[in-house]
Image (cartoon, helix red, strand yellow):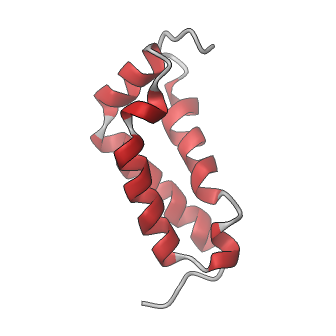
Amino acid sequence: MPLIETEEAARRLARAIASDVSLYNEEKIVRGLENDSLFEELADEIEEGRALYKSRVSPDLYHRNFYDRALVDILIRSKGHVKSKIW
């Protein structure tokens, strides 16, 4: 499979991976936000997604942080209703 070479496709892939992490780990996300330990709770899942993302996009696009931005948008921003001491 050829590497993704466009920003739009790289962003789409990053959001799809982050969405999957969110979909299958709702309890961990809520617990992590409540206890300010989100990235510790999801360390394995985030790194697995990062490895997949890195394997699918060109090195130039990988270093643009699309995956990290997608994690923030999907795992954190969408959970603003969760009571947390971080906000």
Q: Residue at x 35, y 47 (%)?
A: 44
Q: Is residue 59 above or below residue 1?
A: above
Observer-nearest of 8 and 58? 58
Q: Is residue 34 above or below residue 64?
A: above
Q: From the image, which quarter does the C terminus lie in?
A: top right
Position of 43 compared to 85: left or right? left
Tell me where residue 4 sits by quadrant.
bottom right
Q: Position of residue 79 (x, y in %)?
A: 50, 26
Q: Is residue 48 above or below residue 43?
A: below
Q: Position of residue 21 (x, y in %)?
A: 37, 46
Q: Residue at x 56, y 76 (%)?
A: 57
Q: How many marks?
A: 0
Observer-nearest of 55 and 71? 55
Q: Is residue 52 above or below residue 35?
A: below
Q: Residue at x 36, y 20 (%)?
A: 31
Q: Position of residue 34 (x, y in %)?
A: 44, 14
Q: From the image, which quarter does the N terminus lie in?
A: bottom left
Farthest residue toward the bottom? 2
Position of 34 compared to 7: left or right? left
Position of 59 compared to 25: left or right? right
